[in-house]
Amino acid sequence: MRAALQAARHGARVLLLTKSTVGRANCTAVAMGTLRVSRENQDIEHHFQETLKAGKFLNNPDLVRTLVCEAWPSVAELKTFGVNLLVESGKVSIAAERRPAGILLTKALTAAAFNAGVTVLEKTMVIDLPVAERCLGALALRNTGELLTISAKATILATGGYSQLYMRNDNPPPVTGDGLILAFRAGAELQDTEFVQFLPLFTDAGVPRKPIVDWLIEGTKHLVPGGPLINNKGERFLQSYNLLEEPILRDNLIVAIEQESKEDDFVILDLTLPSSDQIEGALNLEFQKSAIRPFLKVLSTKPLHIASFAHFTMGGVSIDETCSTAVEGLYAAGEVAGGIHGANRLGGNALTEILVFGTIAGNHAATYASQTALREIDKEHVKKAEKRLQELKKTKKTPIDPLLIEKDVKSIMLQFCRPIRSGEGLTRAQEELHTIEEKTASMAGNNPDQIKTALEAEFMVTLANLLITAASSRKESRGPHFRVDYPERDDHNWLKNIVLSQKDGKLNIQYAPATR
């Protein structure tokens, strides 16, 4: 939405396509509402180094520099859209009476985009990005079943990540990673697809699953001897992973939780000893205090179960500082893009990223469009898409529900490609995905919604294969990618990004040295 707004401000005619209703097919709407910023030179450098360190130095430093230098101007601008901000200790939070507060950001940006003249087409899924020397626009499927041919001078992908590949995730259902596969098929490069950020979330009935557990544990780890996390043997295990001394980040915490929950698939968070005042007092930010207050009663009453959920994906389409991809006329911004976060995202950088790079993508796409002649999408591209849709509509001898394909993919990913991984398990996953891929030919769609689901399922199978290919290739442990057969981080051999592309239908794997 930020990219569409910026492009419209630059005089471009902008059409925004969304799979759902406007402002709902994204993770921003369900975000808690924190943004990491830096204002003074010293703070900017600290933000830069902190982001690189969290990303285990696989980040593109040019993108990180852009993020930290443009963070404050981009976030401060929200005030002009009517978003109230609370600024404290290098972080900004959206002022709200209840969390998540991301919906306030989404509504504000949507209103600004409408006022700038952006046209929105809801319940429309992009199924192809036709390319003839450059990206010519998009082919999209309406919820009515109509195939739209949309010729465009410039195209921006802002489709989010791919946490929906996992059975357990906290992302909205429409965010299925389509943008990565659209870009991949169009000729763009993907990088770092093996890195998926998981968060611990509550699993007890009636307890909301909000992304607060990681910083809650960090803030309260010294209130209870040995820390508040307990495994199924009754052992408090934070010390075993040096997490009482070391700062808790999302990657080191989730690896510890995964190691300790192999049998029961959960661990216990026990904060029944400290008082509610002590728990709240252990948290530094007012945002954290307000977010935890609704949980204080249940935290003091009983131990709670937590488990890992896919939350954010660091991998994505490779971009430069202008958000340009390897395909001329195609841009990417937000979680669909890779390179900014490296192997692990620093908390608070996600919303900052969409504002910074959304603005950049809108600027450069609009400039490119103003200097480019419109080319119509040729009939061959349209015929190919129509043929695929007709194949899905055909009566099959033994039709397969595409929802079952999606369910099988998610089950495989949850079983074999969580943060704790092994070469044997990844090989097994690839074998099972191959079987599922063969079944996609039997998917049938009796209505537009089923056809959309079938196309999503195809994208998910391809994306799962790419994720597992990268995870199998990375023979080390780094961030949330922990290989039991290669348990050490190996900067000598693996301080590099795994870059995936295809040429003539064949997968190409490159290893690009990361620059510090």
Image (cartoon, rainbow, N blue to C red):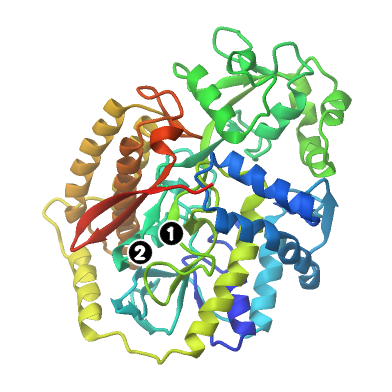
Q: Nearer the viewer, residue 123 or 84?
A: 84
Residue at (59% x, 71% y) in the render? 360
Residue at (35% x, 44% y) in the render? 467
Marks 2/1: CA distance? 7 Å
Mark 1: amino acid: Ser
Q: Judge from the rendering whether residue 390 lies leftward or rightward of residue 304; answer left or right.
A: left
* Residue 346 x, y percent position in the rendering: 62, 43
Tell me if residue 227 can be seen: yes
Residue at (79% x, 18% y) in the render? 223
433 shown above or below 255: below
CB under 8 Å between callouts 2 and 1?
Answer: yes
The residue at the far left in this view is 397
Label 1: how many Cα within 10 Å (few below 14, some 14–19, many 20+): many
131 shown above or below 261: below
Sequence-wise first label, 2 or 1: 2
Mark 2: amino acid: Ala
* Residue 215 x, y percent position in the rendering: 70, 34
Tell me if residue 418 can be seen: no
Local SS, label 2: loop
The residue that disc 2 covers is 188
Label 2: how many Cα within 10 Å (few below 14, some 14–19, many 20+): many
The residue at the far bottom in this view is 373
